[in-house]
Image: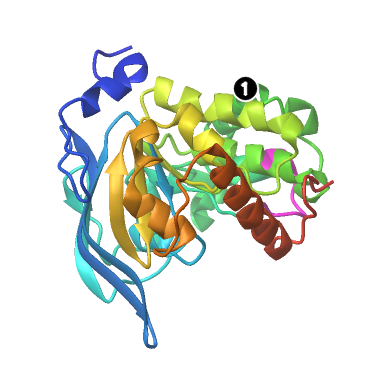
Amino acid sequence: MTAESPAHAGQGFAGVPRVPGSAKPDPILVADGVTRQFGGVLAVDVAHLEVQRHAITALIGPNGAGKTTFFNLMTGFDKANHGTWSFEGRTLAGTPAAQVARRGMVRTFQLTKALSRMTVLDNMRLGAREQPGENLFVSLVRPAWRSRESEITDKAMTLLERFRLEEKAQDFAGSLSGGQRKLLEMARALMSDPVMVMLDEPMAGVNPALTQSLLGHITALRDDGMTVLFVEHDMHMVRHISDWVVVMAQGEIVAEGPPAEVMGDRAVVDAYLGAHHDTDLGDDALLEEDSRITREAEAEADVGPGEDRS
């Protein structure tokens, strides 16, 4: 364990100003002037954002704030109208999604992307780098790729054991529950040995029985030296595992800071409850808003409240 990461991750923010766009001691991802417009709607308008290395950063905000669109821009799944961003000092603007992943930044999706008609193990194998068997001519010479395939399979099984999915290895991915598919997607992301993992609503549609397991896996990513940026509506999860919280509203970054401080920030209150109100964003208000947002997210994912996919 290095002095910079795992247990001491939160200490890296000690002198960081609690203002939007604040500079971080060791940023791994830096975005400047990033905008994305859909027709007359400015979905993302991020003037400046830095994500600290070896920390868990939560990106929160009401529905329609631009969080997932921002993820899509950073990871090459969408194209910005304007702006630049860099990962580990190398520009990523205009870089295709596959190349972004090869550079060490991978992401998961709110609605999982497991290939349902392939086995869990084969889904895992797809996430590995440097597969010589993908080359048409090399694939015809079994000795040229057999050793690498064995290495990939061993790595996949080790990760499936870590995520307690080893007994599902030969099952079709489509047979997994919603929570298990979330675990599979997170495990598959690790097959490429990423430096940074971006999780889009990892708890959406997950049975409460798997929630604690997912939380443990996310904190374990940081403890392994990775950087985590995640979108989430569950404020209790955000408070529990985040080192730093960034708040988006109407496409802009409106607040940043440690979880406890952000929850009491007036800009955050306004973002979630509207500018014209007299209610503090306390636990009751958060619970009520979390419940509403969760119901909407579950409806979009065709999952009933409190119900997992099975």
Q: Which residue matches tag 1? A: 162
Element type where label 1 sits in the image: helix
Where are the magenta residues, as a range? 111-122
Q: Is residue 58 above or below residue 91?
A: above
Q: Is residue 123 above or below residue 211?
A: below
Q: Is residue 114 magenta?
A: yes
| Quadrant assignment, res 149 | top right
Q: Is residue 230 above or below residue 275?
A: above
Tag 1: residue type?
Answer: Arg
Which residue is pictured at 75% across the width and 39% down the height? Answer: 207
Residue 92 painted magenta: no
Q: Residue furthest bottom?
A: 39
Q: Is 37 in front, or is 137? A: 37
Image spot of residue 43 (x, y percent) = 38, 72
Predominant secondary structure in magenta? loop
Instruction: Give the quarter of the image for residue 151.
Output: top right
Q: x, y (%) of residue 180?
A: 72, 38
Q: Is residue 282 left or right of residue 15?
A: right
Q: How is the image coloured?
A: rainbow
Q: Residues within 10 Å of mark 1 (few under 14, many from 20)?
A: few
Name the residue located 41 percent from the left edge and 26 percent from the top edge: 222
**Which residue is drawn at the image coordinates 73% and 26% (left, top)?**
166
Q: Is residue 76 visible?
A: no
